Image (tube, rainbow, N blue to C red):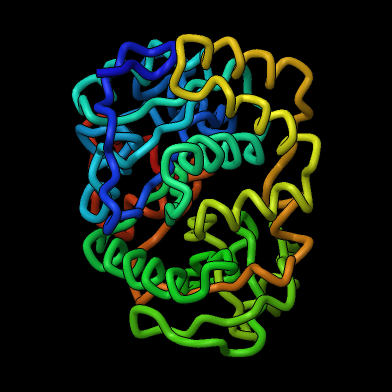
Amino acid sequence: MKRDHLLNVEAPTGLVSPADHMWAVVLAGGQGVRLRPLACRVCGDDRPKQYIPLLGARTLLEQTLDRVALGVPAARTAVVTVRSHARYVAPECSRRRALHVLVQPDDRGTAAGILFPAHWIFWRDPEATVAVFPSDHFVLEEAAFMAHVASVATWVDEHPDQIVLLGAEPTGPEVEYGWIERGEVLGRAGGGTICTIKRFWEKPSPDAARACLAAGCLWNTFVMVAKARALLRAGQEQLPEVSERLARIAPFAGTEDEAWAVHQAYTVMPCVNFSRAVLESCPAALVVSELPPLTWSDLGTPRLVFEILSRARIEPPWLQASDRPA
């Protein structure tokens, strides 16, 4: 048995059989600044939102891990966090003993948060297909959601150079989400189309959001499925400095010096947002798959939290009538 660096979470070696290369990455390193008032309300401190039991007894991270487990075993799931979150993530992940916890020394943005585990998985399984999941989402129809992820993964096996974003059908002109304008239809997965991407609209103005809704654009869930090597190729093309520093960890992977190598890689690494640096450049490899009709929300602001509580008829213990927006 080996121990992933910095956190006392055991993970067995020899995890992947030749016939099974599906991995999951759960992003749990965000700070959740806009939900700190709710964190204080629920937990009495300002912990990041993924560690809050916001919608019931389980934290958002626990809900995400349970959802992911419907399609990917814990032994092939990596939670990516940062050192300052150790006191929150360790108790949750230690109960899932096969889980991998990858600890970044510092928060260097979502680019490092995605590319670091993509490298880490590639070193262990060069044929891996990786599904990336934020840990602050709500999905009501979880089985249907993960079935769609599995269908997209099958499509990716046949189109290994593509990076597939999952797009949700919008229910209104939301200005807090990113929007995806679809292009040419390339194929189908899970009953929906897979299309090229014409343009991203990140948190548009109200007028632009209404135009996106009228044009049939999708909400960007930031859930993506791709071969590990396709993610690494996109990183090399769009973010060479980040990719080169992460690649230097490879000789130390799986050794007692891996934690040191990770620290060295992050020491002067730039802080980069994956959406702005990679997605919004619309590389040719990037496509979008429409999710089936289901209830999805990015719980990024108090307003969105209260909206999903109302829509899904959820009443967590902390919720009082006075908490609801007027």
Residue 240: quarter of image? top right
Where in the figure is residue 24, as x and y percent of width and height? 38, 47
Where in the figure is residue 274, as x and y percent of width and height? 68, 46
Nearest the camera: 202 or 263? 263
Residue 87: quarter of image? top left
Q: At 43% from the left edge and 38% from the top edge, which residue is drawn?
A: 124
Q: In which quarter of the image is the N terminus?
A: top left
Residue 50: quarter of image? top left
User: From the viewer's perspective, is residue 197 above or below residue 42?
Assistant: below
Where in the figure is residue 273, as x and y percent of width and height? 71, 42
Q: At 23% from the left edge and 30% from the top edge, which residue is drawn?
A: 98
Nearest the camera: 304 or 236? 236
User: From the viewer's perspective, is residue 252 above or below residue 157?
Assistant: above
User: From the viewer's perspective, is residue 239 above or below residue 217?
Assistant: above
Q: At 24% from the left edge and 49% from the top edge, which residue is drawn?
A: 314
Q: At 19% from the left edge and 23% from the top edge, which residue is drawn?
A: 95
Where in the figure is residue 163, as x and y percent of width and height? 57, 64
Count of picture labels: 0
| In the displayed structure image, the side of residue 318 where residue 220 appears, left or right | right
User: From the viewer's perspective, is residue 257 above or below residue 123?
Assistant: above
Nearest the camera: 209 or 320? 209
